[in-house]
Each structure stands twice: as structure tokens, then as C-alpha cells.
Image (cartoon, helix red, strand yellow):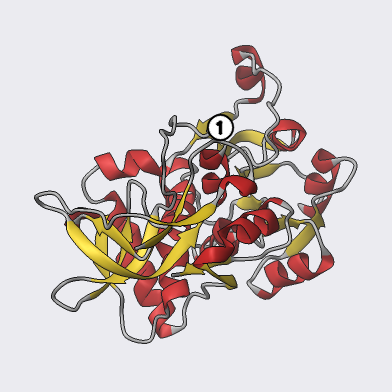
Amino acid sequence: MRAIQVNEFGGPEVLVARDVDDPQAPEGGVLLGVSAAGINYADTHQAENSYLAPAELPMIPGGEVVGTTPDGRRVVALLPGGGYAEKAVAYPGAMWDVPDGVEDGQALAIVLQGATAWHILRTSARMQEGDSVVVHAAAGGVGTLAVQLAKQWGAGRVIATASSEEKRQLALDLGADVAVDSQTESMKDALEEANGGKKVDVVLEMTGGPVFDASLAAVAPFGRLVTYGGASREDAKPIAPASLMHKSRAVIGFWLVHAFRVPGMLDDAIPPMLSMVATGELRAIVGGTYPLEDARRAHEDLRARRTTGKLVLTP
């Protein structure tokens, strides 16, 4: 089969299309014929071995696919890896039927980034009706869905940040109340101004570095900042426990991997969101579709912030 195989760690240049042996499904596994594979920002970290879990070579990246089972079901699945390929092994506990009317790219937008948006709002941030919610990278895969969910769940004010006028307009179209330029000189001041001069209740943060620091400074007493990525590849300043006590604020980490280990967590989020896409209650934005051979270009575009929504590879 054809697949993207990484034989050395590095940037997008290490994503090379090769002919490799078909994977063999172990007992309990299901071999899928892949029609589309999802691309996530975490894949760029995995390719350079800077992700939360160390990678091993050789490696076929990709943690999600839409494919067909041997008995003809069309499913979307979360994988331990191997998605950038014509065939991949999935497991029934992380595999869901795709409703009629939901396209491959839409299903891929939901299964990982949608589940993340759902649980960072509900499980980690414990968003309450009336909360002000900041969504960084609001035009991205998680951000586009988090904006919509926060609004539907009664957020008092949804504040989006994005790097271009086009991306900020997309966030507004999806329901954000205000959109802030992510390149602003003072993110803290910009977030508070966007919230009517008040500090904010919830921040969804995946950039790290100075954006994390400024966002935490804008959090109100009893507010929550959920960190779920480090796109800038910069470390934030160390946080002293006394500084959290002084402001009665919380910093919470989220990694979807842990949801695999809790029965029901993925099922709580993914089937309802797929149904919402099917009925039109939720827009799953597909921002780009690339042939499998163009995985390198897809990663280049993603890292350069040239994309919106979900990116998809088609074998």
C-alpha cells in the first residue's frame, strides 16, 4: 500500500510517500480501507519527536481516519497511529458509524478535535452558563467547534482570537461575539477590553509561551485556563502556587489520550456531535484537502498558519 512514512525526525520534509506492507490487524482489530485521514497540529510535533509521548521510527503518522470495514460499514476511527495510509488498523472501542449526509472531512473534524473541544469546555473548564470564554486559534480545527459549542451551551460572551481578518470573520460567523487579533502587542489588555473591561472566566489555550502568560493574567478569580497544546513551541513562565491562590484561578491541562481510558468519555462527545453535523446544528469546517503524496505541503501550510478548520489527506 501507499503510505507516508517517517524514517528520521524533523520538519515537514521528513514526510515521504513510500510503498510499504499492508498492516496486519491483530485479534480484536479491524483493517479499514482508508478514504480520508485527518491532520492535526499534534502530528507536526510527532514528526519532530517533540510531542507529549515519544515517537518511534519508522513511523506512519495519523491518529484518525474515515474508512470502510470488511463488512462494508463506513466508520470514523481514532487510531494509535498509522492513519496517513491507504489502509489502517482500528479498534471497535474507538470507532463510530458515520451518519448519512456527513462527509469524510466533517467526520474527521469531529472525532479528535471535536471531542477535544467538547471536553475542554465541559470536563476541564466546567463552563457555566453566562461565563465569558476565550477561544485562541478560533479558526482552527478545535477552535471553530469550541466557539460554536460555547455559544450553544450558554456562554455569556465568546471572545475569539485569530491571526488574520479572514480568520476573525470566520469566528464571528460561527457565533463569536468579538474577535481579537492574535498578533496584538498586549493580549491581556485586548482580552479584558473585549470582555467589557473585565477579566475572563474561561480561556482555551493551545499556543504556549507569551500567549499563555498573558491569557493567565487576564483570568478572573475562580476562572479557569485550560491548556491543550503548545503550537508556538515556546515555554510559558513557571507558575508559583501562591500566584494561583492570590487570584483564586486554576490552570488545567488536557490531553485527549486520557479520555480513551475512561469508559464513555468519547461516546459522550462524538456520536452527539456527528448527529449535530448531520442535522446542521453544528458546522464542521474543512479547510483543505490534500492528496496523500502532499502531506509535506499540508504540514507546511498548517505550521505557517495558512489554514482554517480541518485538514484532510486523501489516499
Q: Residue furthest left?
A: 27
Q: Is residue 47 left or right of residue 19?
A: right
For residue 159, which quarter of the picture?
bottom right
Q: Which residue lies at the image location 62% right of the left edge and 52% below the top edge?
A: 133
Q: Which of the pair 249/170 is nearer the observer?
A: 170
Residue 36 seen in render: yes
- Residue 278 position, x and y percent, is 39, 82
Which residue carries the number 1 mark? 50
Image quarter where the C terminus lies is bottom left
Count the marks.
1
Q: Residue furthest front?
A: 19
Is residue 127 placed above or below 230 in the rendered structure?
Answer: below
Image quarter where the N terminus lies is bottom left
Q: Amino acid at mark 1?
A: Ser
Is residue 242 placed above or below 171 in the rendered structure?
Answer: above
- Residue 59 position, x and y percent, is 41, 43
Q: Which residue lies at the image location 78% right of the left edge and 47% below the top edge?
A: 191
